[in-house]
Amino acid sequence: MSALPFYVEPTDPPSKQELLKAALKLFARDGVRESSIRAVAAEAGFTNPVLFKYFEGKDALALHLFERCYLRLVREATVALAEGGTFRARLGRLINRLLALVDESPEAVLFVNEELRRYWPRMSPATRRHSLIGLTRTFFEEDEVSRDVDRTLLIAAFWGLLGQFARMHAFGEWKGPAVNAAPQLEALVFKMLAS
């Protein structure tokens, strides 16, 4: 039996597990707006009423998945930055952990990147306290980061680069594991950030 994806709880009933997997696949591939309840249920091997057993509708399902995927990104970033070492070492760990998540669940990373604007304002207050932008801003306050460029632009460049790479990987434009790009991405980001 294969391991469950991180966004599925082992205690979830099998039908809910299949709905979550099917929904993330379709939401990442086609977008939430373009994915119908009927399509999600069919992809999971069920009829529409099964979805309503667990969620009020497609949007509630999408928000549920978005929070789980977003919080996993936050966990990876927090762990990478919490470990000691130089700025460069923590940057390398951050990039490696994020790319490992791209390899583990490209749909989850793509979904968060594509739907952040839509679902961030609607997430629970507890989840909103864990901002990837805030975490990055704190990290970029260190002396190794250039003072010549506005931090907000550096944060946008960092997440934009990683988000675009995740898209390219998901669509097969990067061959092989995403983590293989870590040294090159780290070098690019470090050049961009260095003072």
Image (tube, helix red, strand yellow):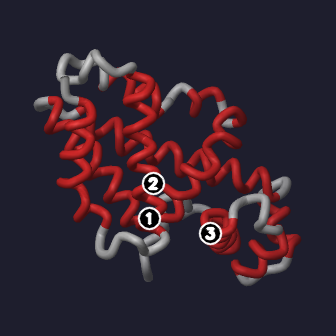
Q: Name the residue that disc number 3 marks.
A: 29
Q: Kindly report which numbered mark, 3 or 2, lies closer to the viewer in this rendering.
A: 2
Residue 13 appearing in the image: no
Across and down, in percent, residue 98 comes to: 35, 51
Q: Amino acid at mark 2?
A: Gln
Q: CA distance from mark 3 to mark 1?
A: 13 Å
| Picture disc at residue 38 | none
Q: Quadrant of residue 148?
A: top left
Crowd rating for badge 2 (residues with CA inside 10 Å; few <14, some 14–19, many 20+): few
Q: Earlier in the sequence, mark 3 or mark 2?
A: 3
Residue 17 appearing in the image: yes
Along the viewing direction, whichever of 3 and 135 lies nearer the viewer:
135
Along the viewing direction, whichever of 21 and 180 lies nearer the viewer:
180
Residue drawn at (69%, 32%), measured in percent from left and top? 121
Query: From what the image shows, is residue 110 above or below residue 160?
Result: below
Q: Amino acid at mark 3?
A: Arg
Asked if the residue under mark 1 is in contact with the one under mark 2, i.e. CB atoms within 8 Å, the reply is yes
Q: Earlier in the sequence, mark 3 or mark 1?
A: 3
Residue drawn at (41%, 72%), measured in percent from left and top? 173
Decide if residue 86 is on the left or right side of residue 174.
left
Q: Name the residue that disc number 1 marks.
A: 168
